[in-house]
Amino acid sequence: METDNLKYVLRQFVERLLPPCKPRQLAVPSGTGKVVGLTGVRRAGKTFLFFATIQRLATQGVDRRQIVYLNFEDDRLHPIAAEELDLILRCWHEVFPETAGRRKHLFLDEVQNVPGWERWVRRLCDTEDIEVYVTGSSSRLLTRDLATALRGRSITLEVFPLSFRECLSFRGLEIVRYDADNESLIRHELERYLLWGGFPEVVLADETLRPLILADYGPLMLYRDVVERYGVRNEKLIRELLRYAFRNTASLLNVSKLHRDFVSQGFTVSRNTIFEYLGYLEDSFLIFLVPKQEASLRKQAHNPKKLHVIDPGLMAAFQTYPGRDLGHKLETVVFLENRRRQRDLFYYVNGSEVDLCDGDGKFFINTCWRLTEPETRRREKAAMELGFARWPNAQGRLLYHEYSAVSGQEMPGAVAAWRYLLDLE
């Protein structure tokens, strides 16, 4: 790493005017005495959460010269090795000597690009009066790097694309209770949310640009966060696997069947390779694999996983008709809303299927797009009865977008999906 380039980057950041940041439901804590990590899929808004935190510190009276932000995807910092990280403090003191001996705030973006960064951060926290914040687009930042190296001295938060409530806020739309026109508007906005998803750049973009942005996101995430990071050799296979995932969200994943399908398409691949590649996609926050709720971990491992993707809008990058499969998209959005709150989620099947549940019998959820057809009613009623039979004290919810009540056939636990997603039940 060239020290002159580093000094230029340091000064440029301190002197630049930060972009305006729209408020998110997640706020980055400061003054905790711990390293704060943000992890999540690329383009979900981690950098802007950093900027919002920096702006908050500045309004609290912290001198901007005591705050440094470095993005390790900045080509001016490449190549950088772990042993060169000490140059950051050295150059910081040379450019801003008045900060020596004063408390510092260091923000490191996409830190996984520097092997060995976590040991340096640990030493920094042991020897300097400094608060450190890091981001990464890999779950290893959460489960291995920070937790192992810092041994209880870190806090890690997951950052998702915008929730439906955040999406409305970003678009400046107000929620008005007991207003029929506003309710119609919110229902329409939910349909748009299922189509375009919640990536902040997409939500704020002109509608004509949204498909172009999403089409760029797919290859970017695949190659930067999967192929390059893990040295994947069979790029065609990992690309087809990701396309399969985004075309089949909210579906049970049978790896044996998937393996047979790939072999029939001419791929030379083992089941273990498919498992490995699925792990890469999950580690990069592109997919989630939800286990069946079972008391036995061995039974959990032997049952198919339910597949969910990180954002319904990204499906537009992998299928010809992004307006299709709205029911599956809605189920994935409901999963993501709950995944923001807790990590241990399951599905359950025993004749009928419960789409989502926790591990303690506190709640279960089924989701469907249109609760109007008799066959759909029978299927969803059976699923709700299964849930209440298995978890008698649980809060059961049947979420829908369209519903016409029939006298004498009211559905137990039925709630409009938009109300649930906005916590307006």
Image (spheres, rainbow, N blue to C red):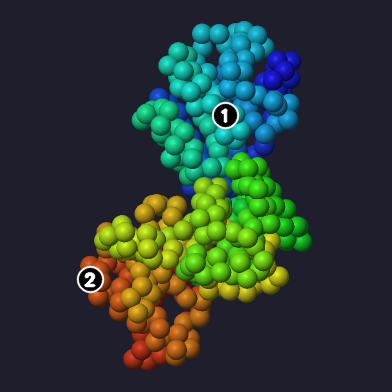
Between 412 and 221, the one lying in front of the other is 221
Count of numbered badges drawn on the protein: 2
Tell which of 166 and 249 is nearer to you.
249
Residue furthest left in the image: 392
**Residue 100 marker:** none
Q: Is residue 367 or residue 29 the one in the foreground?
A: 367
Q: Which residue is located at x 70 percent, y 23 percent?
A: 9
Q: What residue do we see at 23% from left, 67% from top?
A: 393
Q: Which residue is mark 2?
A: 392
Task: Return the disc, 1 or 2, that comes first in the chain's sequence.
Answer: 1
Circle 2 sits in a helix, a strand or a loop, which is it? loop
* Residue 28 coordinates in the image, percent (x, y): 48, 37
Q: Which residue is mark 1?
A: 115
Quadrant housing residue 207: bottom right
Residue, x 35% and y 61% (percent of image)?
300
Density class for disc 1 (Cα within 10 Å; few <14, some 14-19, many ≥20) is: few
Residue drawn where x is 30% and y is 73% of the image: 387
Residue 196: image quadrant is bottom right
Q: Could one spot residue 59 in this view of the protein?
A: no
Kind of residue at disc 2: Pro
Q: Is residue 125 left or right of residue 99?
A: left
The kind of residue on which mark 1 rests is Pro
Percent from the top left, x then y, of residue 230? Answer: 59, 43
Q: Residue 161's x, y, as percent?
A: 56, 52
Q: Residues within 10 Å of mark 2 (few under 14, many from 20)?
A: some
